[in-house]
Amino acid sequence: MSLEGLNGYLVEIQTDVSGGLPNFEVVGLPDVRVKEAKERVKTAIKNSGIEFPSRKIIVNLAPADIRKEGTFFDLSIAIGILIAIGEISKIKIENFESTIFLGELSLDGNVNRVNGVLPMCIEALELGIKRVILPKENAIEASIIKGLEIVPVDDLTGTIEYI
């Protein structure tokens, strides 16, 4: 999820990890904070005890024609990469298609609070999303929206263990 003004909208994180020269690119009209996610995600994965792949990684934020701003994509980008390298199986994630991930990653793998959770959760519910995995510090705010399962997490490792 992302914000456009005060409204939330769905952003699909598409991840491809393939052979070739090691490279990590984020495309789909990312702003500077989203582009910086590459370093936060890479370091958070490594510092969570998981080997970061030395391969070509492309992350597309769709729809590509809307500017993406903010740091709430970090957790979903990390999850996308971990699924692409086989660290997490999509089959293991119950109701994966109706789950969203929100959160900024710190370099040690902690999941930090983000702004704008309430409008994103409202839009998620309207889109039929059933579960939101987000920073523990945002859980009370998000729990105002009835009909969503709110899953508060502290760090990337705990997120992986939960899903």
Image (cartoon, grey):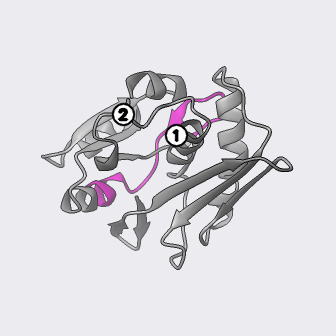
Give 57 or 157, whichever is nearer the viewer. 57
Which residue position holds label 2? 93
Label 1: which secondary element: helix
Image quarter for residue 64? bottom right
- Left or right, residue 125 beside residue 18: left
Give 59 or 104, whichever is nearer the viewer. 59
Residue 70 on image: x %, y %: 54, 59
Mark 1 residue crowding within 10 angstroms, few (<14) / some (14–19) / many (20+): many
What amino acid does circle 2 point to?
Ile
What amino acid does circle 1 point to?
Ile
Label 2: which secondary element: loop
Mark 2 residue crowding within 10 angstroms, few (<14) / some (14–19) / many (20+): few
As drawn, the label of residue 79 is 1
Count of numbered circles in the view: 2
Q: Residue reaching furthest front?
A: 19
Magenta residue span: 105-121
